Structures are given as structure tokens and as C-alpha cells.
Image (spheres, rainbow, N blue to C red):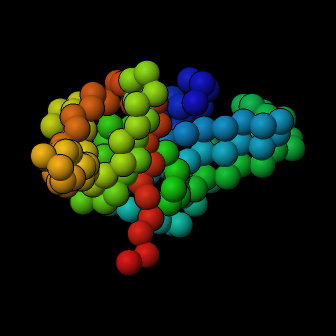
Amino acid sequence: MQYPEIEKLVEKGLTELGLVDMYLTDCRIRGNKVEIFLDSDDGVSFLKCQKLSRWIEAVFDENKTFGDSYTLEVSSAGVGSPLKQLRQFPKNIGRIIDITYGTGQQVKGTLTAVDGNIIHVQYETKVKEGKKNKKISVTEQIKFEEIIESKIKISFN
């Protein structure tokens, strides 16, 4: 996401419309197509997206930001989309997460806690105990700033 003008516009729209539980997770511009992806502490609804879309569209049209011919899509970040904001992690506690961080280390396990900017992921690993392998539970603590990519894994159990 490298569109500071769009980011500021979305933040202004969310504030003016009273949608303070929502926040921008990504923005893509390809030619004349503008895609804005949102998340929320309380869930992203079609009506909220529609409300923001109409507000942004009015600003684009007034300023001729993309001329007369453009496509604007405002939607939820969607299941399987990478978590990009620290604010997205707490609502996913208890779910399976796959994180790449640091210099390429990877961990997949259960997101158990978020403490400030520290993400806690619990997983099982095998250790040798004498001649036998024993499973133990390990909790990895990862600084949010070190995360390269993180995705919630969908489970159909």
C-alpha cells in the first residue's frame, strides 16, 4: 500500500461517516481501477462499504481524480488475506496462523495472545528424550515489526 493520498481520504471518510470501527488494510490502483480493502473490529458489512464507496466516489468525481472513467471497489479484506495491521490480530486469537518473519523464519500455530506489539503463537514440536520423540508445546513471541507476512488459516473441522 503506497498511496498516501488515498489512505488519508479513506481515513477522513471513515471518520466523517462515523465508521470508527473500520480501518484500511490495503489499497491497489491498476490503471483506472481502484480497490480499497477494509477490516473492522466489529465486522465489515456491505452497507458500511457502500456508504464509504459513495462518499469516496463523490470526492473522486468532484476532483476528477481519475477522470470520468474509473472503477471503484470498496470491500472487506476477505478471508485468507494477509493481516497487515496490528489491530487485526486480537480478533483472531484462537485461530491458526501462518507467519513468516525476521530473515525468513516461519511458524504455524495457534494465535494465543497479542501483548502490545508482541504476537504469541503456540505450536507443538518434537524433541528427543532419550531414544523417544516427545511432543512439547512451544510459544513463539514475534514482534509485529518483524512480520513479513501473516495469514489466518481456514479450518473446516
Please say whether residue 65 is visible from this viewpoint. Answer: yes
The image position of residue 135, as x and y in percent, is 19, 55
Say which quarter of the image contains residue 28: top right
Left/right of residue 5 with respect to residue 110 in the rendered view: right
Could you say which is closer to the camera, residue 28 or residue 148?
148
Could you say which is closer to the camera, residue 33 or residue 134?
134
> Which residue is farthest bottom?
157
| Residue drawn at x 61%, y 26% as measured from the top left | 3
The image position of residue 30, as x and y in percent, is 78, 37
| Residue drawn at x 40%, y 31% as measured from the top left | 105
Look at the image and tell me in which quarter the C terminus lies: bottom left
Left/right of residue 95 with respect to residue 13 in the rendered view: left
> Which residue is farthest left?
130
The image position of residue 71, as x and y in percent, is 78, 49
| Residue drawn at x 53%, y 66% as measured from the top left | 46
The image position of residue 13, as x and y in percent, is 49, 42
> Which residue is farthest right?
69
Seen in the picture, residue 96 relative to 116 is either above or below; the reply is below
Say which quarter of the image contains residue 34: top right
Left/right of residue 27 with respect to residue 104 in the rendered view: right
Left/right of residue 141 with respect to residue 60 in the rendered view: left
Look at the image and tell me in which quarter the N terminus lies: top right
Question: How many dots with numbers?
Answer: 0
Please say whether residue 5 is visible from this viewpoint. Answer: no
Say which quarter of the image contains residue 117: top left
